[in-house]
Amino acid sequence: MKILLANPNTSQAVTDRIAAVARAAASPGTTIQAVTAAVGAPYIATRAEAVIGARAVLELFAEHADGADAAVVAAFGDPGLGAARELLSIPVVGMAEAAMLTACMLGRRFAIITFSPTLGPWYQEIVDYNGLTSRCSGVHCLDEAFADVVHVAEEKSAQLAALCTRAVAAGAEVCILGGAPLAGLAFGIAQRVAVPLVDGVAAAVRQAETLAALRPRRPVAGSFRRPDAKAMTGLSAPLARLFGGTG
Amino acid sequence: MKILLANPNTSQAVTDRIAAVARAAASPGTTIQAVTAAVGAPYIATRAEAVIGARAVLELFAEHADGADAAVVAAFGDPGLGAARELLSIPVVGMAEAAMLTACMLGRRFAIITFSPTLGPWYQEIVDYNGLTSRCSGVHCLDEAFADVVHVAEEKSAQLAALCTRAVAAGAEVCILGGAPLAGLAFGIAQRVAVPLVDGVAAAVRQAETLAALRPRRPVAGSFRRPDAKAMTGLSAPLARLFGGTG
Amino acid sequence: MKILLANPNTSQAVTDRIAAVARAAASPGTTIQAVTAAVGAPYIATRAEAVIGARAVLELFAEHADGADAAVVAAFGDPGLGAARELLSIPVVGMAEAAMLTACMLGRRFAIITFSPTLGPWYQEIVDYNGLTSRCSGVHCLDEAFADVVHVAEEKSAQLAALCTRAVAAGAEVCILGGAPLAGLAFGIAQRVAVPLVDGVAAAVRQAETLAALRPRRPVAGSFRRPDAKAMTGLSAPLARLFGGTG
Amino acid sequence: MKILLANPNTSQAVTDRIAAVARAAASPGTTIQAVTAAVGAPYIATRAEAVIGARAVLELFAEHADGADAAVVAAFGDPGLGAARELLSIPVVGMAEAAMLTACMLGRRFAIITFSPTLGPWYQEIVDYNGLTSRCSGVHCLDEAFADVVHVAEEKSAQLAALCTRAVAAGAEVCILGGAPLAGLAFGIAQRVAVPLVDGVAAAVRQAETLAALRPRRPVAGSFRRPDAKAMTGLSAPLARLFGGTG
Amino acid sequence: MKILLANPNTSQAVTDRIAAVARAAASPGTTIQAVTAAVGAPYIATRAEAVIGARAVLELFAEHADGADAAVVAAFGDPGLGAARELLSIPVVGMAEAAMLTACMLGRRFAIITFSPTLGPWYQEIVDYNGLTSRCSGVHCLDEAFADVVHVAEEKSAQLAALCTRAVAAGAEVCILGGAPLAGLAFGIAQRVAVPLVDGVAAAVRQAETLAALRPRRPVAGSFRRPDAKAMTGLSAPLARLFGGTG
Amino acid sequence: MKILLANPNTSQAVTDRIAAVARAAASPGTTIQAVTAAVGAPYIATRAEAVIGARAVLELFAEHADGADAAVVAAFGDPGLGAARELLSIPVVGMAEAAMLTACMLGRRFAIITFSPTLGPWYQEIVDYNGLTSRCSGVHCLDEAFADVVHVAEEKSAQLAALCTRAVAAGAEVCILGGAPLAGLAFGIAQRVAVPLVDGVAAAVRQAETLAALRPRRPVAGSFRRPDAKAMTGLSAPLARLFGGTG
């Protein structure tokens, strides 16, 4: 099985980090292809950057989805997820979505832990958008300067573990480490936190495998069927093909 | 006062329609500038097209917002609204948002009436995203072929009025005519429906004026403050400037 | 355009304050008529006082609505708003309603800031009644003795600005200054708070203008159509006429 | 024990009906005093009439509550209930409130059945206001002309039983017969409907007895403590005394 | 009238405590029979123990319900309540359910106060399951070691009263003392807390009387009708009879 | 990897059916052990039967969980799931839970389709309990007599496919075939329905594998940590050991 991970951020170092965690989490025999956005922010943290990232995700899928069995939007806010689900003929999952749904099988209420207060409201929106507000005990953000987003997981691992512990005291039964730069951290600090931790990349890869294995048919009705072909203007050739129906 | 309307659709005819309704609805002394997306679908009806439209909205605002007092995202699903609210120094409203909030002052429960079943789930998402689910009695979609989206309002006015009447029987106390191509129809069929009708363009223009008149300060905290400047890659020059902080 | 503001409180000084803010906020050419309840409490702060105030509002509208283009219930809990909307042939808005709906266009989550803990539960009820619970980050009440309700805005302006700042730290993206005695304060402290502030009177006047400008038809179906004429007992002559259908 | 029932409607015939059902439902040794509003509508069916009824309820309690052990607001929309709860030193229950909470012990989802479509939106508001939306399967209204509101229960008993049966098919596990004029009907048609029926008057009387028997202390904190005495203007002598703290 | 209380815990001392409070709360002429689970935990505090307790409740009802007019599940999480409601021909109420619904008539928002943090999430689940989330201001748990669950009410009465006071400061308008071992405490500390307190046993007994007095018919439709007789395996003789339809 | 499926029903034929689907859905190298309840109903359809089934599930896990890597509660209402999650040291998933969470990655709104109206309210409760009410477009039940629950999937496949199609027309973007006797049907009728179908057994097996692969730590805090050992009375030896902490 081949799974395509599209990193909507422009940082290759984040992609490398994600790819390594994805490979470690995947089933034997699963191949991971991880690609990086050519357009946008090195690390998406706002609605404006997510708008750019959402379109970048579609470009990446348009160029690379051929031959993949499932695809992952590899940024925690899931930019472009619904759009990709309409356009692609393979299953698509988002990192936040996969992490939250997986967490729901490990406890009644999950917390999301992340490394910057900027991300808080955006992550709360993704919780609400998924209809999981009642399952979320809170979004907890570290509020400390850090040297480099690519290595923030290692730099702040102790503080992030402590933040998980505070989330548990506030009612969390599971903690999700949110944000692509924290990929892998859940495994590193698992024994320092009293409840299960969920890694977004690992959850997304396993859920992508699950969907591919279940072979759901592609919808031909409802709001996730392929959009009707239209006269789209100004798209790149691959994206135009994807909208045109050969994706 | 000058209000900028950005049509995320590529159809100039729809822009012309919107602009005419906007001018009729605006206060004396208000100038309307209506601009059209250069990239995307002639008429946005899916999440995938909205992803393209959201970025197109930012491009339009990047090019044209100078000198405007307020801005309007002139498509009913409000693509790019939150992003624009972060980036622009002037108030921004969305057509769906303005229509729904205005409707809330005319009754307890509003219905949204539109001309194609494709739009139903997308409009329901925008209701839910705005936290107004409990105020919405339903999204009602005409399910008939039509000749041309630009003139669907005239072609189907009788059927759309009848659909409003069915919505009233199902509990609506106000009806919103949703979708830019229906701009102006609310005024045309007002006497054929037993409850108040809301026109999205007229509501958006008036709400944009209201926000501009109230002179709210631009936030420097919270999730709608301007995003920190980052090394953005691959944007057009105007969009790069907008992200860079001169918007 | 003429807008009628009915103050359900018996305090003429509060009415004068509201009227001044209303005139400053209104469009050129709009006339403000502000009237004061003859019956009830100098300042409504409980459900019991609101019951008296709701009827007082109807009396005021019965006497003064002739010739007005729109009407405002000028107390933050909106006593009598739904009833007035049934009875009057012109649009009616409430101060709390208008402030909250306006705030929804400036951020995802608004806080309500007020000057007495007594008002907290009542304001929370009005948030819930409007179906806006998910849009409200909290109702924050100053808990300090004050000399005089009419001048509490000036006496406590620093403390109220500080309370806004605490609300922002707790997630508010917009702050509403709630309670008629705080009318005007939002403009005075705007630069001391990091997010936009909403003044209830200014919002209500502008929204009343908006509704009047949109010329919604009066409903003849649904729960806001005029109540059927009945044999009402014991009403004042103007109120009897209003119930009788000449309002 | 003595229970005071205040009928916010001006119809003595409705009061007589309520009183008879209340006496049949009360425990041995309980005395029922039923009083009728002097001001307002013969039968409250709108928000505007409820505003008048809410104040009328307070007048009735001001005049008659001395010596009572508990009080009932005997109209289905519970006008003035929260206000009375603040002002009186004895427990107060509303007919709708008591019926709904009682129904919650007989099934997961209750329906409300009533005799006129006018009452539907108002009853839905009372469901929502009580936070019981998720427990209510629907509000079902007969839509037929009737000769006389006082005898509508007998005139339409077959149709109302049939409407209950339709509500059961739509998911109701309990049916509430809503509206004071239907008092007693639940007992008459119990064997014609496949699920338990709840009579609002009987439920309210029993719940009033329950609260009185539990002897809850009167709150001196929170939003239901007695309002601070204020300089109230224009009230009747009994109402002024009630607001003044001798209620 | 005879009311059967089934204690799903195996502690006879807790049953004795419950029975004494029940007798004090019951109407004159009501007989209380209190029975104790033969199987399970001395004090249920987890979902696993509740599974055992739920079946134990059905065993108790199977053996003892003959001749009772109503039944009470006398543990705060209401284990087995829905099942008993299906199987028994008499009304059944749960202690948590009765306490919460009674509290709803004494204030808008109730808190639940209990003696161990273990109980918090389970009690929150029962609030949510009853659809009363919006009526609950919080579940507050004492977090101190105690000598003996049977006498924790007396040992920690001062601390529990203080916890109630903190709940009031956090918005509670009524406090429920949750957990069978706290039976009776509400009466003992009533004057130390500024809002009404609700005792679960007293509320349940009175509500059981209320339901019995109202004589609701047994449903023959909907999800609380008696389950169809099936070939049940491995049940005790009384339980088999109860499932077989002689309950 | 070894996965244990506990069928809370006493029907061996249903267990065989589940086991076959589970084996077909599992990854290469996964072993399935399927066990059948010794006590209870042949097919659980009510709350009362679920109480018996929940305890039977714990008995099955107590006897058979040794050596398993994950466990599945193999009945659609997930009886005993939370309890098992507390007691077992391996991950546990429920069939309904797994199906619903999987469906959330295939569309915004799922429907549940089942073969008997009796199951409707119970399935709706499980949707609500999981906090997924807003993601569910409806629970749709066939209402036709069938010959034998074990073969109802084959007997009614055409009718169930037609019911899926009706659910799609009513807004479902994914359909879950609910109820263990329908195991496997989703694969058989996939091409007859226009949206993806989810099979509960297949989803549960894959989700159990996913959880096992992610190696979440066992919680030692929060409500899913192992219950403290207590003096449990009247349990079977294996169940006593499981409660005693050797599970």
Image: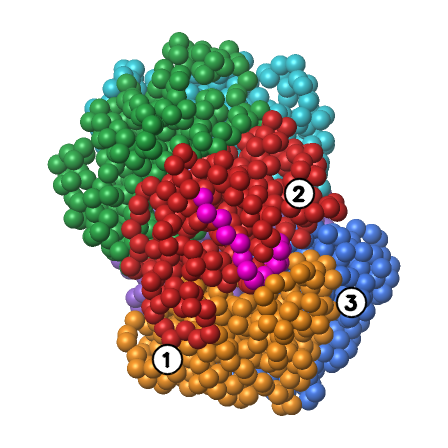
Chain colours: A cyan, B green, C red, D orange, E blue, F purple
Discs 3, 1: same chain: no
Residue D72 quadrant: bottom right
Mark 1 falls on what kind of element?
A: helix
- Which chain is home to disc 2? C
What residue span does the magenta drawing correspond to?
C32-48
Q: What number of labels is visible?
A: 3
Q: Position of residue D58 (x, y in %)?
A: 58, 71
Image quarter of the C terminus of chain E: bottom right
Discs 3, 2: same chain: no
Q: Horizontally, is F100 left or right of F187 in the view? A: right
Amino acid, disc 1: Val
Please check the rendered image and state whether residue D247 is part of the magenta-colored stretch, yes or no: no
Q: Horizontally, is B36 left or right of E230 in the view? A: left
- The residue under the point 81% across, 69% down is E188
> Mark 3 near mark 2, Cβ–Cβ under 8 Å?
no
Q: Position of residue C172 (x, y in %)?
A: 58, 36
The alpha-carbon separation of the residues under discs 3 and 2 comes to 39 Å
- The residue under the point 62% across, 55% down is C42
Local packing at callout 1 (Cα closer than 10 Å; few below 14, some 14-19, many 20+) is some
